[in-house]
Amino acid sequence: MNLTLSTTTYSRLLILSAVSGACAVILFLTLVSGRQTLPVMSSCLPAFRDGGGPYYKPDSPFRTRIVPAGTEGKPMIIKGVVLSSDCSRSVPGAVIDIWQANESGSYEDEWYRGQVTADAEGNYEFETVMPRGYGEGTGYRPPHIHFKVFADGREIVTSQMFFDDVRGREGFSDEYIVNLDDKPEQLIGTHHIVLPDFP
Ligand SMILES: [Fe+2]
C-alpha cells in the first residue's frame, strides 16, 4: 500500500487537525469556565447558630481590612467560600459581617469589625490580626471571630470561627476552626462557611 500523501492532501490534513484542536480547546474552556470548582469539604457541617453576644454593632463599614493602620501583630488574611447547606453550590454576593476582639482581648467601637461581600463565586476575604482570648476561669473565651452572614436580603446565621488552640477540645468541632498557614509575612487562614437551612 502506498501511504505517501500529496502535498495538498497533507496540508488539508494539517488544517483539519488544527481546526479540530482549536475546537476542542474552546469546548474545554467553555466547560471549565461554566463550572465552578467548589472546595473539597471533609464534612459539610453548617455553621452553628450563636446568639452574637454584646459586642455586635449593625451597619459596620464595608472594608476588607478591619484593623487600623499601624496595628501590631502579624497580618492575618481570612478567606473562604460561602456555601449552601449541602455544599453543592456557593452563595455569590453573600455579605459577611465580622467583629472580633483586638490583640489585647478587647472589643473596640470603630475597628476590628467590618463587612465584606462574597464575589461571583462565593469567595470572601478580609485582613485582620489574631484576636486574643478574654475572660477568666470558666468564663474564658478562646480567640474567635464572630460573624453574621446575610444572603437573599435576610440574615441567615450568626456564628463564630475559632483557631487551633481549641482543636480537639470538647464542644469545638474542628470544622469551626480556621485552617491557618503561617507564612513569613502573614497568616493565611481558610474557613469555608456552610449556611444552615440555605438550600
Ligand atoms: Fe467574642
Image (cartoon, rainbow, N blue to C red):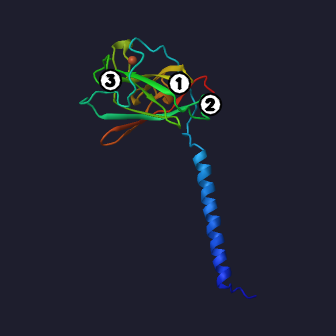
**Quadrant including the N terminus:** bottom right
Cα separation between marks 3 and 2 = 32 Å
Do the residues bearing badges 3 and 1 touch, measured as CB atoms within 8 Å?
no
User: Which of the numbered marks, if any, corresponds to residue 47?
Assistant: 1
Tag 2's secondary structure? loop
- The type of residue carrying mark 1 is Ala
Whichever of callouts 3 and 2 sits on the residue coming sooner in the sequence is 2
Farthest residue to the right: give it: 1
Task: Tell me which corner region of the image, top left, top right, bottom left or bottom right, holds residue 98.
Answer: top left
Q: Nearer the viewer, residue 82 or 131?
A: 82
Q: Residue drawn at (42%, 16%), measured in percent from left and top?
A: 58
Compared to 26, does 162 lie above or below? Answer: above
Residue 148's x, y, as percent?
A: 47, 21
Compared to 33, does 90 lie above or below? Answer: above
Q: Nearer the viewer, residue 157 or 91?
A: 91
Q: Is residue 104 left or right of residue 89?
A: left
Instruction: From the image, tell me which residue sits under label 3.
Output: 132
Q: Residue drawn at (62%, 50%), measured in percent from left and top?
A: 31
Residue 114's x, y, as percent?
A: 39, 24
Tag 3's secondary structure? loop
Whichever of callouts 3 and 1 sits on the residue coming sooner in the sequence is 1
Cα separation between marks 3 and 1 = 22 Å
